[in-house]
Image (tube, grey):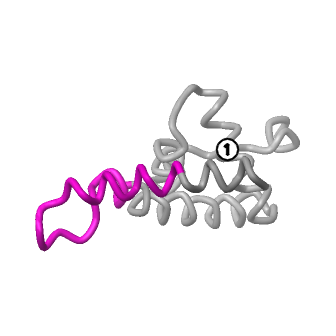
Amino acid sequence: MASALAYADAALVVLLRLQAEMQPGSVLHPDLGEPLEYRAEVHQATGFLSVQASVGLTDALLLLRAHAFAGERSLLEVARDVLAGRLRIPLEEDEDD
């Protein structure tokens, strides 16, 4: 518990310092807001893949992450390719078809 609290305190300090760099009137530091923008695309691709592969959302996200890792690509790149129809991630069973 003590370690978790120490990490939380350190994260808070980083967040506060980033926000302190912002100009008056700005809402959120770009380094903090950028990941939020991409999260929707990953969730959409997860849902798309879930339907495409007939698997649950957890398994679909694992498939996305595994494909990204195996291809040494970011999760966002893979998600965008799935959404654009440039990438179909087959299950092992589908590869024989």
Task: Give percent across and percent down for residue 80.
Answer: 46, 50
Q: Label 1 belongs to which residue?
A: 89
Q: Is residue 92 left or right of residue 57?
A: right
Q: Position of residue 41 (x, y in %)?
A: 48, 60
Left or right: 48 as drawn, with respect to 4:
left
Q: Nearer the viewer, residue 49 or 35?
A: 35
Name the residue: 62% across, 46% down: 88
Q: Dividing the picture into quarters, in which one does residue 70 lie?
A: top right
Q: Quick one: which residue is furthest to the left in this view?
A: 24
Does residue 16 appear to the left or right of 43 in the view shown? left
Point 48% across, 57% down: residue = 12
Q: Main secondary structure of the magenta part?
A: helix
Which quadrant of the rendered structure holds the N terminus?
bottom right
Q: Nearer the viewer, residue 26 or 14?
A: 14
Q: Which class describes the residues within 10 Å of circle 1: few (<14), some (14-19), or many (20+)?
A: some
Rendered position, 93 above or below 2: above
Horizontal side of 5 relative to 87 (left or right) equals right
Q: Residue furthest right?
A: 93
Give the residue type that dot 1 points to. Ile
Give the magenta range. Answer: 10-34
- Seen at 36% across and 58% down, the residue is 16
Q: Is 81 covered by the magenta stretch?
A: no
Of 5 and 89, which appears nearest the observer? 5
Residue 3: percent from the left, percent from the top? 72, 47
Reply above or below: 81 against 83. Answer: above
Number of numbered discs visible in the structure rendering: 1
The reply to whether the magenta stretch includes residue 16 is yes
Check the picture and name the quadrant holding the C terminus.
top right
Residue drawn at (67%, 44%), measured in percent from left and top? 89
What is the secondary structure assignment of the residue under circle 1? loop
